[in-house]
Image (cartoon, helix red, strand yellow):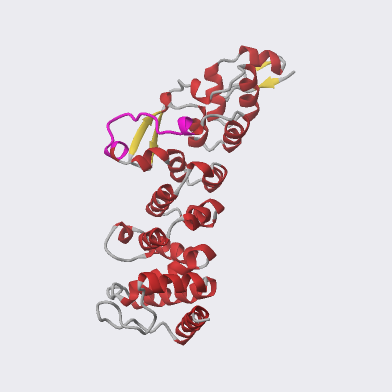
């Protein structure tokens, strides 16, 4: 006797072979199987329906709240969005890799239950909707798959937005997944110098803004990742040094200042001396111990940091004179 379980958890098809059961099931059962993580049923039904477009099947009832901001009726959601929203990674891999669906169409933000100023005014919100679902569920594996395997969908615009959403959600594991990914590092390396600086300032600076609302754990995680990863470390060093030299850390506690010293020392070990020299010359960033642009002396980061920075600067200046 074979017991076959439907997507909704029932098992009324007893004593029937799998092929007979599959022929009895409907498209709504496919939606339920996706929602309830019954991948074998999903795979069999997709073959039975000869499915090639995940957008053509919709209609499951229910409501879904995203980031405690908006509520969606999932009756408008396609198979791909239902799988992401309900953490069905195996189905996501199947839909995106084997079915070769049109990802930009399948992943766009569905209609919401009521008017949303965020959705209407922010295109980044609409384009990163599947990533927001992963952040909402605090699912690092789903975030990694969407961000890495679907990397051609994302650019610097999305990187900044997703990092901000991760920080606001205090999803520290997600921040590490994002910044350590080849996708983020490739996007960062494709930025021009001024764009890199803007990105690092937004992520690391302590001026007034939404960063003030981020938790200390989030701020320290971002600093740690930015100063310990080869692509970011040089400009992160610039950003932290310049931020301190302008006196913007004056309101910070001694403990926070000492943490910044640790991040700066870490960045020294990962920086690219040529990139450092280029930024120092073209963007006019202050070195440790050199008065800032407003005349305020830059704090002393300790002999170790100062010595290493000066060694790199001298090396670059010597190379340029050859």
Tell me which corner region of the image, top left, top right, bottom left or bottom right, holds residue 197.
bottom left
Please give left or right for residue 210 compared with residue 309 in the image. Answer: left
| Image x and y of residue 31, in percent | 52, 24
The stretch drawn in magenta includes residue 115: yes
The stretch drawn in magenta includes residue 214: no
Can the viewer see residue 297 in this picture? yes
Can the viewer see residue 8 in this picture? no
Residue at the left extreme of this rendering: 294
Q: Is residue 82 above or below residue 284?
A: above
Total labels drawn? 0
Q: Is residue 290 above or below residue 3?
A: below
Image point 63% across, 23% down: which residue? 5
Image point 53% across, 38% down: which residue? 87
Residue at the right extreme of this rendering: 1
For the magenta stretch, what is the residue range? 104-120
Q: For the N terminus, give its image quadrant.
A: top right
| Image x and y of residue 186, in percent | 52, 54
Q: Is residue 5 above or below residue 81?
A: above
Image point 36% across, 74% down: which residue? 285
């Amino acid at each position: 006797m074979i017991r076959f379980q439907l997507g909704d958890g029932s098992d009324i098809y007893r004593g029937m072979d799998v092929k007979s059961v599959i022929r009895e099931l409907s498209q709504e059962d496919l939606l339920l199987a996706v929602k309830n993580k019954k991948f074998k049923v999903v795979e069999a039904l997709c073959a039975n329906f000869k499915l090639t477009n995940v957008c053509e099947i919709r209609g499951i009832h229910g409501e879904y709240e995203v980031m405690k901001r908006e509520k969606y009726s999932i009756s408008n959601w396609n198979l791909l969005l239902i799988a992401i929203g309900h953490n069905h990674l195996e189905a996501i891999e199947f839909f995106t890799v084997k079915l070769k669906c049109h990802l930009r169409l399948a992943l766009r933000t569905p209609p919401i239950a009521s008017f949303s100023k965020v959705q209407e005014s922010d295109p980044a919100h609409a384009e990163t909707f599947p990533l927001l679902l992963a952040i909402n569920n605090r699912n690092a594996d789903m975030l990694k798959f969407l961000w890495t395997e679907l990397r051609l969908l994302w650019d610097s615009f999305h990187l900044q937005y997703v990092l901000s959403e991760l920080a606001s959600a205090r999803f520290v594991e997600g921040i590490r997944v994002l910044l350590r990914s080849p996708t983020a590092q490739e996007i960062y390396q494709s930025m021009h110098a001024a764009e890199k600086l803007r990105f690092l300032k937004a992520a690391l600076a302590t001026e007034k803004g939404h960063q003030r609302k981020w938790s200390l754990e989030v701020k320290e995680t971002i600093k740690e990742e930015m100063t310990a990863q080869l692509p970011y470390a040089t400009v992160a060093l610039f950003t932290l040094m310049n931020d301190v030299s302008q006196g913007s850390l004056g309101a910070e506690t001694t403990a926070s200042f000492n943490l910044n010293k640790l991040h700066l020392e870490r960045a020294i070990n990962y920086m690219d001396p040529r990139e450092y020299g280029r930024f120092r010359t073209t963007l006019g960033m202050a070195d440790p111990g050199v008065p800032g642009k407003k005349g305020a002396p830059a704090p002393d980061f300790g002999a170790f940091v100062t010595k290493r920075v000066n060694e790199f600067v001298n090396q670059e200046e010597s190379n340029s004179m050859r």
